[in-house]
Image: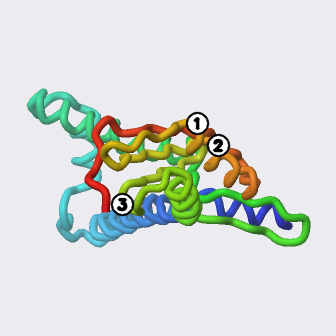
Amino acid sequence: MTPRILKRETHSSRARLSVVAAILMTLLAVYGLLEAILRAVGQPPWLIDPLAFAQRLAGLPEGIEPMLLGAIGVLLLLVGLIFLAYAVLPGRRARHIIPDPRIAIVVDDEVIASALAKRARLAAGVTREQVMVVVSARAVQVNVRPTSGIRLEESHIRAAVEAELAAMALEPAPEVTVKLSGSGVVGV
């Protein structure tokens, strides 16, 4: 049960896109039913006669400018690619798992970034505004702007951040990159 919960918490749901597709298909079906009923009772079509629409669709590209037809094709292609991408690509949320045999622990990447920024700040001896940490699925990027005139060792900061990550035991374990800014800031 726990692996299923962890997967549900770390991967985004496809429910919203499925609901949008279902609503669009339902509206199209209801409209088709409305037009069919109007045709069956001898009333004029509400928007377009289904037979006339089918004949016009079968006769394409006749009667439509090539630019408009191309624009419609590109729009349909983009919508199809969006649906395909949502179906095929993994929808991953910005979260990591901390393994525990008894309970499921899911930590947001922003919380991890905050803890790593504090550790990097203490290792570098700089203020909070001088450190920025970005956490993604497989990487941690630590950006440090040193105080003017004070040299910082990238390896020392990296070691401190990696030690903090090792203590967290995240799954998947991200790779650490430290970048020291070429320009410093005036010390406080």
Q: Earlier in the sequence, mark 3 or mark 2?
A: 3
- Is 125 situated left or right of 47 in this image? right
Identified at 48% across, 46% down, the residue is 142
- Looking at numbered disc 2 in the image, what kind of residue is underneath it? Ala
Characterize the local packing of mark 1: few (<14), some (14-19) or many (20 or more) Cα atoms within 10 angstroms: few
- Kindly report the distance in space between the C-alpha atoms of the residues bearing marks 3 and 2: 21 Å
Identify which residue, 115 or 86, lies in the foreground: 115
Q: Which residue position is annotated with label 2?
A: 159
Q: Earlier in the sequence, mark 1 or mark 3?
A: 3
Characterize the local packing of mark 2: few (<14), some (14-19) or many (20 or more) Cα atoms within 10 angstroms: some
Q: Residue furthest right?
A: 101
- Kindly report the distance in space between the C-alpha atoms of the residues bearing marks 1 and 3: 21 Å
Which disc, if any, is residue 107? none
The C terminus - image quarter: bottom left
**Coordinates of residue 121 in the picture (x, y in percent):** 49, 57
- The answer to the question of whether label 1 and label 2 lie on touching residues, with beta carbons closer than 8 A, is yes
Identified at 67% across, 54% down, the residue is 164
Identify which residue, 24 or 36, lies in the foreground: 24
Identified at 49% across, 64% down, the residue is 16
Identify which residue, 123 or 40, lies in the foreground: 123
- Looking at numbered disc 3 in the image, what kind of residue is underneath it? Glu
Q: Specify how the rendered protein is coloured.
A: rainbow
Quadrant position of residue 48: bottom left
Which disc, if any, is residue 129? 3
Identify which residue, 14 or 62, lies in the foreground: 14
- Kindly report the distance in space between the C-alpha atoms of the residues bearing marks 1 and 2: 6 Å
Q: Which residue position is annotated with label 1?
A: 155
